[in-house]
Image (tube, rainbow, N blue to C red):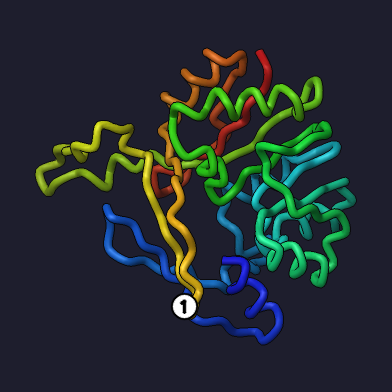
């Protein structure tokens, strides 16, 4: 994805960013959507940006589209991404605070943490959610908030009669494996988590956090606000 972002920034065009999963047909991410303005963002993302305050962390910032909106509003925002191509692109686009950084090794404290475009997916599995909350213990400032979106993808497994037939994988149905390809660069497989709101709220509570649903989208997606109990 980082290579695609760098190409689009440099030339205004990019090749196909292909997405593979053993559970689904091949998909594609339109690279230009990663550069969208506030006006072109989904309502859930707009609502999250409107609620960001204080020292803010933008996780998996990509091209920096969310950070640039907040920066223009005077918010003290730091963007992080694990891709050096994305980090360099964000710097070239004018994001002032950018780190090539893995969320799970991050230090410092933030009043607002943004994980948009289902960036909570980096957790990978339900089993790793406690690890995620322990990192949140360290970096979420007192009185701070995590704003994130995700989706309940149970509808994917619904048949024409309305019955849901989950795959017999032995895992939570929202735990997926993906792989991306851009031109001749084929990434390594990675785990990605989609989590329904009820399960997310339960696990948050077990780990000392409260989850509030701020908005529902049109495609089984939702925006959540997570705070310490």
Q: Residue at x 29, y 39 (%)?
A: 154
- What is the quadrant of residue 39 in the picture? bottom right
195 versus 34 height, above or below = above
Q: Residue at x 73, y 49 (%)?
A: 101
How many labels sit on residues? 1
Quadrant that contains the N terminus: bottom right
152 versus 132 height, above or below = below
Read off the residue under disc 1: 16
Between 160 and 195, the one lying in front of the other is 195
Neighbour tally class for label 1: few under 14, some 14-19, many 20 plus, Cα within 10 Å: some
Quadrant that contains the C terminus: top right
Image x and y of residue 138, in percent = 75, 25
Residue most toward the left? 161
Q: Residue at x 19, y 37 (%)?
A: 168
Image x and y of residue 94, in percent = 85, 67
Between 128 and 36, the one lying in front of the other is 128
Image x and y of residue 4, in percent = 58, 74
Q: SS of the residue at dot 1?
A: loop
Q: Is residue 215 left or right of residue 140?
A: left
77 versus 164 height, above or below = below
Between 65 and 9, the one lying in front of the other is 9
- What is the quadrant of residue 122 in the picture? top right
Image x and y of residue 191, in percent = 44, 46
């Amino acid at each position: 994805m980082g290579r695609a972002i760098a190409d689009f920034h440099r030339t205004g065009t990019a090749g196909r960013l292909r997405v593979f999963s053993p559970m689904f047909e091949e998909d594609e991410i339109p690279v230009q959507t990663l550069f969208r303005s506030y006006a072109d963002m989904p309502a859930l993302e707009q609502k999250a940006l409107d609620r960001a305050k204080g020292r803010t962390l933008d996780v998996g910032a990509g091209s920096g589209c969310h950070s640039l909106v907040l920066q223009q509003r005077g918010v003290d925002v730091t963007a992080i991404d694990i891709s050096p191509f994305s980090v360099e692109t964000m710097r070239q686009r004018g994001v002032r605070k950018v780190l090539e950084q893995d969320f799970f090794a991050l230090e410092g404290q933030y009043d607002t943490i943004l994980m948009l475009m289902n960036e909570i997916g980096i957790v990978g599995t339900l089993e790793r959610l406690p690890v995620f909350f322990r990192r949140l213990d360290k970096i979420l400032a007192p009185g701070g908030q995590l704003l994130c979106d995700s989706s309940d993808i149970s509808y994917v497994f619904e048949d024409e009669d309305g019955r849901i037939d989950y795959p017999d994988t032995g895992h939570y149905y929202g735990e997926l494996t993906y792989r991306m390809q851009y031109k001749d660069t084929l990434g390594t497989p990675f785990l990605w988590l989609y989590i329904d709101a009820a399960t997310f709220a339960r696990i948050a509570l077990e780990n000392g956090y409260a989850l509030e649903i701020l908005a529902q989208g049109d495609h089984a997606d939702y925006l959540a606000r997570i705070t310490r109990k």
